[in-house]
Image: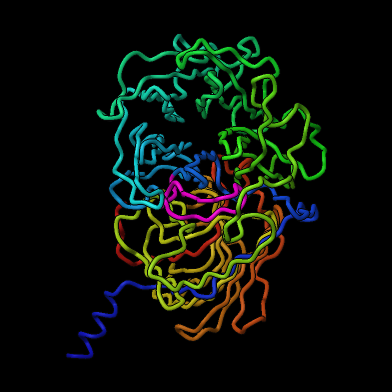
Amino acid sequence: MIALALATALAAAPNTAAFSHFVYSGSDPSDAVKAAPGQYRNPIVQGFYPDPSITRVGKDYYLVNSTFAWFPGLPIHHSTDLVHWTQIGNAIDRPGMLDFKRLGLSRAVFAPSIDYHDGLFYILNTCVDCGGNFLITAKDPKGPWSDPVWLPTVGGIDSSIFFDDDGKAWIVNNDEPPEKAAYPGHRAIWIQEYDIAGKKTVGPRTVLLDKGVNPAARPIWPEGPHILKKDGWYYLVAAEGGTAEGHSQVVLRAKTVTGPYVPYTDNPILTQRDLPKDRPLPITSAGHADLVDTPDGRWWATFLAVRPYGEDLYNTGRETFLLPVEWKDGWPVILPAKTPIPYVHAAPRLPATPAPPTSGPFTVAETFAGPELPKGWMTPRIPTSRLWSVKGGTLSVQARPDALGGHAQPSLWARRQQHMNATVSTTLRFTPRADGDKAGLVALQNDDFYWFVGLVRAGGKTLVRVERRTGKDDPVDGVVAAEKPLALKPGAPLNLRIRVTGGVLDFAYGTAKGRWETVLAGADGTTLSTRKAGGFVGTMLGVYAYGAGEARLTP
């Protein structure tokens, strides 16, 4: 009876995949451009860190980025020199703050903005298809951040807040135009006063920018607006041209916060669309800038751009860059026309603090010491139960029947691919119980585009297998791309590796340290590029477990 009870209990216990020795290493062709002493390297934060917004508090700088339907969301980075950044928290870090439902991975939390006023940090953000625009606050940027204050009168996306020196606060955002849209992509920038004490908008809404700075050119998607004040002028900075290769940044100014705003005659103040496509080591799609001053009176801009390895092909997503701002006749200019974004540049004259690498070639070995995962690791959507544990050098993940492509809550944790050329490896211990059980490494762009290599049980046999999904026409649980039989004792370690070289993927395994066998080489990694997979995110590299017969979690 005791043996039967024990067997029953073991069968009911969740099946778990244990991952250890997780190592990420990466480099880029642009590393050949060396940074001299006193210079920094662009991007300052590599990988899927789009839509950067920045604020200064004394000598400290804080940066926030979009994460869409990944959780925890809205990473907060800190720096003292604008170059070396350390992630100190995530603004969306607990269930109940937001509900991402079964949204695609490029929905949910779009471009956030971060500001500081009177002892409080403010983040404005849009939860697309999951509630609209909201505001959260914190006394410490590390958190905890408040539950959202919803802003029902603020439509559209990309809201930000401006605190004027007269005590008033204003919210600006992208929304529908005042009249019927004249063409696809016709949008407007609006402003409305915000009652700080009442936590609500008040008064009329006013249009600051309709269509764009040159309406005759039918510009698309004026977005990411911010207002700053300098020398008695109010400056409205915003992106135009969409987030692809036509992206740009423009500026307008006015003597009153509600306008009228007059465009700079030499707009855009940042773009790469006016450069030849065949230039070496291109940086493209630059825009969505935010400006910040330093204690010595200089100004700098953070913005997003991408580094393609082919014709608009990039797997690393939109990244965070930094350039100085030059004021010309009262106007801020980030980069003159037809000027490539430099990979290296003279650094700000600011005191540096030690920080983990976020730019250039580097290797990171995760120790999984626990009790939590590193702050940069994320999972799709928002889990409602704790399905993982971290301690003693091991990340343990429950194998459950929510597949990668199912728009649900797969047992997946991952970190960003931050280089064109990257390698990720881990050691797996997993005993598949039933046909269909699997665990291993993933390279994932979204629910419809991913690659997997790992331990699989099929037809009563244990295999090492590569699976892929390259579009909605493929099965949710993937298509077999390659497999090999594997003689492995239950619970024995299996080493797994994914190597990325631009748009090429190689998959390998090993049962002994330092000895690798190829499962599949030369796979088409361009399927993980934004151009083919769509959306706004970048490739995530991480661990995944699936249990065909385990209990299902309803997200």
Look at the image and tell me whether residue 46 can be seen: no
Q: Does 285 appear in magenta?
A: no
**Vertical side of 301 occupied by 221: above or below:** above
Q: Position of residue 10 (x, y in %)?
A: 28, 80
Q: Nearer the viewer, residue 537 or 253?
A: 253
Q: Nearer the viewer, residue 151 or 451?
A: 151
Q: Position of residue 209 (x, y in %)?
A: 52, 15
Q: Residue at x 32, y 72 (%)?
A: 14
**Vertical side of 433 occupied by 204: above or below:** above
Look at the image and tell me whether residue 220 can be seen: yes
Please provide the residue range marked out in magenta. Answer: 69-90
Pick the quarter of the image with the N terminus. Answer: bottom left
Image position of 162 (left or right of 250): left
Q: Position of residue 358 (x, y in %)?
A: 61, 55
**Vertical side of 224 occupied by 531: above or below:** below
Q: Residue at x 40, y 23 (%)?
A: 170
Q: Residue at x 62, y 37 (%)?
A: 300
Name which quarter of the figure residue 250 lies in.
top right
Q: Does 77 appear in magenta?
A: yes
**Colouring:** rainbow
Q: Nearer the viewer, residue 230 or 456?
A: 230
Chief secondary structure of the magenta span?
strand
Q: Nearer the viewer, residue 100 or 35?
A: 35
Residue projecting furthest to the front: 296
Tally of numbered discs: 0
Q: Residue at x 36, y 23 (%)?
A: 168
